[in-house]
Image (cartoon, rainbow, N blue to C red):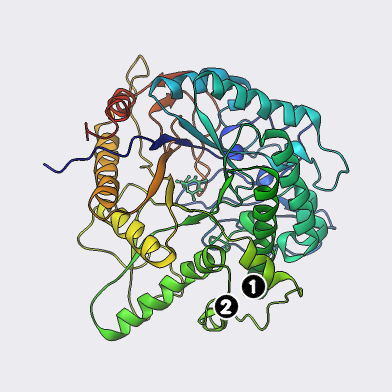
Amino acid sequence: MLNKKLPKDFMWGGATADFQYEGGFNEGGRGLLSHDYETNGSIEHPRHHTMKMPDGSLINPRSSFIDAEDVPDEAMPIFIDDQYYPSHQAVDFFHRYKEDIKLMAGMGFNVFRFSICWSRIFPTGEEEKPNEEGLKFYDDVIDELAKYKMQPLITICHDELPMELVLKYNGWASRKVIDYYVKYAETLFERYGDRCKYWLTFNEINAIRGFGPTGVRKSNGQDRYQAAHNMFVASAKAVQLGHKMMKDSQFGAMYAMSEIYPATCKPEDMFFHLQEHRENWYFIDIMGRGYYPNYAPEVWSHHNVKNIEMAPNDKKDLMDGQLDFISFSYYRSNTVKDGDKWFNVGGSTNPYLKETPWGWPVDPLGLRYCMNEIYDRIQKPIFIVENGMGAIDQPDDNLYVCDDYRIDYLKEHLSAMADAINIDHVPCLGYTMWGPIDLVSLSTGEMKKRYGLVYVDMDDLGNGTLKRVPKKSYNWMKRVIETNGLAL
Ligand code: BGP
């Protein structure tokens, strides 16, 4: 059997996002976020934003990150009484962070990836001074982590914007937001820089189709690719500033990486696959190598992008603000063939792979493939910052879940990761699994799509005691970390 033991400084941990995990949406001076108006949903019923038109009529534009809908300029977000908004309570990390961190430490985690809620620090995004109560909350979280010798890995912006910036500026479509972001990042570096070395400027920045990441209210490619450019510049400025302010700081940005396979070796399928792949490489190349690639105009042509407006210093900023490492989420692979709908997440069916109940193909080798491919191309260390299996758990009367299926998924993926490190010699800083404590799903807003090693007693509508109970996978993970991978 191949040795799965990992390098001794390998970072093991878990990852979360504020609006799926934290809750406390109207506490501690927090402002409202784009996600706060997003309802729960399911595979059959996509999530949507609740909005009101000037004549009082209600509309529900779809907000899914696969296919968002246009939101009319005059529509204003509104809360509707009979709707459930999962970000408001999420699973209440806001009040339970001590208990949750203790549980994570109990598995031997030495890193915890979480996102800071932008509107908890700058409630509208435009304040002169940050909200001290918000800063204090994350101080407490980081200090709690330190008690257990866990280091933070901070996502500065996880698919969200203060709602005011969405309404006033059409989100990242405006360069104004670059300045607000840089000020926000500087505030975090000043406050937490002495205790945080690893930072992610954005989460899944390549998933710009949805309302969340860019805050752009139109689904057209022109606005969204312009927004992406503005985010690249914001990231590059933050990286330069962070390097100046925090000696030894390391920056990544996070990409949604579903490995993409051609359905056959037919040349047209192969070429289509190359083009689809570039939909992701576009983001990684620009931020990882510091310049727009030769194929950028070809990508734009698929999204009717006429022109990307750039300021005179942007090229230099992109070059000087390159990332130090490349981090990504990996859940599944996709298979595509010539003629498929463009950027068809879900793609064609891969007959060699089983799927989760949410139709996500399970493909551990795809993770090794992905790590190799990224490193071959960018030559910067990798950090796997999300991976896991969304499944329906069946707790017994004591809320204990016997989740062998999750153990199988994690074991196979971690083994593939270990092979990429030990056999292919891909430098990999660490692994933070998605949602170590059950949290709300991003794509469907459900609770029943669970990733955790710890069960949270809460249903899709937020009912339950919110009690935390370790699952079978909890002790399994503990053993894997104790042996630094040898137990895999
Ligand atoms: C990524 C996001 C996370 C997350 C995860 C799992 O896209 O960065 O926020 O939730 O995917 O997706 P889901 O929750 O839809 O199962």
| Up/down of 479 relative to 335, above or below | above
Where is residue 57? Give x, y as percent. Answer: 77, 55
Question: In this figure, which residue is indicated by the disc labeled 1?
Answer: 220
Residue 135 to residue 449: above or below = above
Within 10 Å of disc 2 (Cα), the crowding (few <14, some 14-19, many 20+) is: some
Q: Quadrant of residue 62?
A: bottom right
**x 60%, y 56%: residue:** 63
Q: Residues within 10 Å of mark 1 (few under 14, many from 20)?
A: some
Name the outermost residue toward the top. 398
- Residue 465 visible in image: no
Mark 2 lies on a secondary structure that is loop
Q: Toward which corner of the image does residue 371 lie, by quadrant?
A: bottom left
> Of the numbered discs in the image, which one, if any, rests on residue 155?
none
The C terminus - image quarter: top left
Question: Residue 37 versus residue 365: which sits nearer the camera?
Answer: 365
Percent of width and height locating residue 75:
78, 58
Point out residue 125 in the picture as x, y percentages from the top left corner. Answer: 80, 47
Amino acid type, mark 2: His
Residue at which label 2 appears = 303
The residue sitting at the right extreme is: 128
Q: In front here: 428 or 458? A: 428
Left or right relative to 372: residue 299: right
- Judging depth in this view, the residue of 238 and 277 nearest the camera is 238
Amino acid under disc 1? Asn
Q: Residue at x 35, y 59 (%)?
A: 370
Q: Is residue 118 above or below residue 475?
A: below
* Lower sequence index among marks 1 and 2: 1
Whether tag 1 and tag 2 are in contact, CB under 8 A, the answer is yes
Reply above or below: 268 against 478: below
